[in-house]
Image: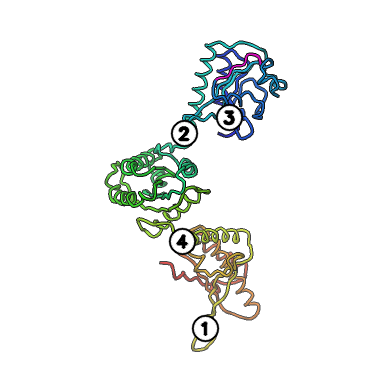
Amino acid sequence: MDTSQDNVLSQITSLTSKILNMPSALITVSDTHSLHIKAKHNFVLSEMRKVGALDQYTMQTNELLVCNDTSQDERFKNSPYVSGEPHIRFYAGIPLITKAGYAIGTLSVVDYVARSFSKMQRRDLKTLASITMALIEYRNAIGLIDAVTLLPNRQSLIEDISQSTDIFEDFVLILPDSIDLTYIYEMARSLGMPTVESVLKDIGLFLRLNISRQASIYSISAGRFALLVKKEQQEQVLSTLMSCADRIQRSLTSHIPLKLEIFIGYTEFQIPIDDPQRILREALSALHDALKKNTRLMAYHKESDEYQKRAFTLLNDLSDTLQHDHPGLYLVYQPKLHIKTRRVIGAEALIRWRHPEFGEIYPDQFIPLAEDTTLMRPLTEWVIQQAARQVRKWRQSGINISVSVNVTVTNFAEEDLIERLQRILRTNELSIHDIEFECLETQK
């Protein structure tokens, strides 16, 4: 639980104070050195040190504690919260204990004069503590459960990996992907989220019915699931999943046609793990390899992962270079030679990139990456502008040749391409014959 004040729990402290006829009530949550006051009613402090705190004593004894007069009690009369602010004179507190038996904090009431505490008040305080703990655990469970499929979520998976007690045991994290994310978005756009959620529930139920006896199942994102299994069960679970891949399309009944196909990525690891997020990322890397290569099943490959991380870095750096006009990109010009006359009649502009970390990078390494993003428009714009400036310089030096520029099919589809080209030509005092377009060899 975070350490901020909680409005719902504050209502419980207000109710506790009213029911028990006490001026102040508070709910604390224990930290390494402090007791954070998660909620309070008419109490001046927001945090207390554990040393000398009556709530800390309550947690240590793990049972209801009632002190009618703290100033006369040898255990508490020297407490800084008795002798100093807020000058607690009466205290009654009960630990908040989880289902696993851990005391995580307290529910307590205090008064600033000595007083008694009846059996009925003790019973009511216990009841209110049970309600408080149930609420805390319920809200914690909600944070670890996917609201649509009701399966444990990604955070739950990370906690299960990090808190596993199977030391030196080998595990496998398997990610089956059953429905394309783009398809989910289109379904939501056309039919609404209730339809999407209904499909996701059915997929989650299908996996539970087929896999739950062999593995722990998690829902880590829309349409994407995770299975945590011990290494010796790997072959059996993967075999079951491959069987599911053949059956899922016809097993799910829906009033709309579904496009379902299971792709699987997995990675192996050993407990304990310092960074569970890395294991999830490796499994995702394997899954994306399976999707990209249209292969049902792929294991994690470090080489492929390193390539993808490098590609991601290049895309980010390319975007940053174009946006902020950083140095690195430049053009080289390959002359076009008329064989009979042996005269240069033109040139082709070829882009190069001198990356600050990876050195010289050729276009076949970064152009295919940019083609799948929105970067092709500003990149092509940059090339055209640079080429136009070079042609202008050649004109001023008496060299009269045209330059061709490579563009993609998506560039041709841009509605304002011609207007932008005309503006660049006018700026550099060129004609439409000075710049030629060529479609990339990779385009179909």
Quadrant assignment, res 193: top left
Vertical placement of 51 versus 245: above or below?
above
Disc 4 designates what residue?
304
Mark 3 / mark 1, whichever is N-terminal: 3
Residue 285: image x %, image y %?
Answer: 45, 55
Distance, label 3 to label 1, CA atoms, is 80 Å
* Crowd class of label 3 (few under 14; some 14 to 19; many from 20; radius 10 Å): many
Q: Which mark is residue 337?
A: 1
Mark 4 / mark 2, whichever is N-terminal: 2
Q: Is residue 259 visible?
A: no
- Closer to us: mark 4 or mark 3? 3
> Residue at coordinates 49% horizontally, 69% vertically from top-left?
364
Vertical placement of 169 versus 407: above or below?
above
Vertical placement of 412 versus 49: above or below?
below
Mark 1 / mark 2, whichever is N-terminal: 2
Disc 2 designates what residue?
141
Q: Which residues are magenta?
A: 64-69
Mark 3 / mark 2, whichever is N-terminal: 3
> What's the residue type where badge 3 is placed?
Val
Distance, label 4 to label 2, CA atoms, is 37 Å
In the figure, is residue 295 to the left or right of 395? left
- Closer to us: mark 3 or mark 2? 3
Residues at badges 4 and 1 in contact (C-beta under 8 Å)?
no
